[in-house]
Structure formats: C-alpha cells, structure tokens
Amino acid sequence: MEIWKNIKGYEGCYQVSNMGRIKSLSRKVWNGKNYFWTSERILRPGLDRDGYFLVNLSKNGKAKTEKVHRLVAKTFIPNPENKEAVNHIDEDPSNNKLENLEWATVSENNNHGWHNKRSSKSRSKPILQLNLDGEFLQEYQSATIAAQKLEMCRVSISNCLNGKTSTAGGYRWRYKA
C-alpha cells in the first residue's frame, strides 16, 4: 500500500511516498505577478548523469533540486547515527522504494558498491546490442560492460532490457537467449 507523508520543509506543498513517488499538492502559488491555484499532481522526475531521479521543489519563490531517494529516506527512515549517504540496496539508482533504501556512511555506501560489483561477475547476463531495426550489432558480457565501452549510463541499458524503455543510446537491447 502506498503511504504519503509531507516532505520536511515543504509541508502543505509536496509529499513523498514509500514507493518513491513525489506529488505536488493543491495550493495557491505566487508566480511573481499574482496568485493562481495549482491542482494536485504526481511529479515526473528528471534523471541525473549517474541514473538518480531528481525533482524540482519550490516554496516562496525559491526552487531547489532534490534527489528522490534522499527525500524518501529523510521522510521514512530514522537516522539516529546521522549517516550522510543513502544506499540503494539493489544498486539500482532508479529503485527508490522504501524497502530498497538504507542510511550508510560514505565509506559503507562505496564498499557496498564494490562488493556487489565483485559478486555480480558470476550473476552477469550477456546482452545483445541491436540497431533500431532489430539487427544484431554487438554482444557484451553484461550491461555494465556495454555501458563502460559505449560511455553510456548502465541504468538506461537496464531499463531497456527490463522493458521500461524501448531504446537506450539509440539502440535496442536484449538479453542473450
């Protein structure tokens, strides 16, 4: 079940859910000349170069860009040790669901990534790069290797492989059968 809570500092303006979604609440907004009424809506996040979702939040005429995973963690996960980083347990920066996030030190967060890279070698699946007509171009040992060789975002390729998008980097991607 999706649970919504106010975002600290933006009470009455924005809420975040345990599913990693952000919504703008119905409210009166000043546009510099006059007030207008805005209706409630789910925000469509942008993507930074590392694959993390971002949203722009504004209050009293001041806009700020926030990372969605940090908003989820700050709102739902207690942080008694004041750890500064939010770790994606499954290493997928687009998975901002509450159960996939945890507070970590920068060192813990970095070590988590390296540990998963070492252990993922045995789990990696070969993938195929296809042109837009579906013709085979290249085979790679994994999405990570393809992303490194083509200087692309691994998450973009993974999203294509998992059916979230149809293309990534101007190519189609499929797991090798």
Image (cartoon, helix red, strand yellow):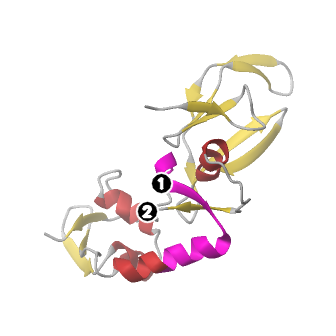
The range drawn in magenta is: 94-114
Q: Position of residue 97 (x, y in %)?
A: 48, 47
Q: Which residue is mark 1?
A: 100
Who's the residue at 36% across and 63% down the image? 158
Element carrying mark 1: helix
Residue 100 in the image: above or below residue 4:
below
- Work out which quarter of the rendered image holds the N terminus and state it: top left
Can residue 168 be seen here? The reply is: no
Asked if residue 42 is positioned above or below residue 90 in the image, the reply reads: above
Residue 104 falls within the magenta-colored stretch? yes
Q: Quadrant of residue 57?
A: top right
**Structural distance between the alpha carbons of marks 1 and 2:** 7 Å
Give the side of residue 156 with respect to residue 160, left or right. Answer: right
* Amino acid type, mark 1: Asn
The residue under label 2 is 90
> Relative to the observer, which residue lies in front, 89 or 22?
89
Alpha-carbon neighbours of circle 2 within 10 Å: few (<14), some, or many (≥20)? Answer: few
Please report the residue visible at 60 percent of the width from the left and 45 percent of the height from the top: 72
Q: CB of mark 1 within 8 Å of CB of mark 2?
A: yes
Tag 2: residue type? Asp
Total numbered badges shown on the rendered structure? 2
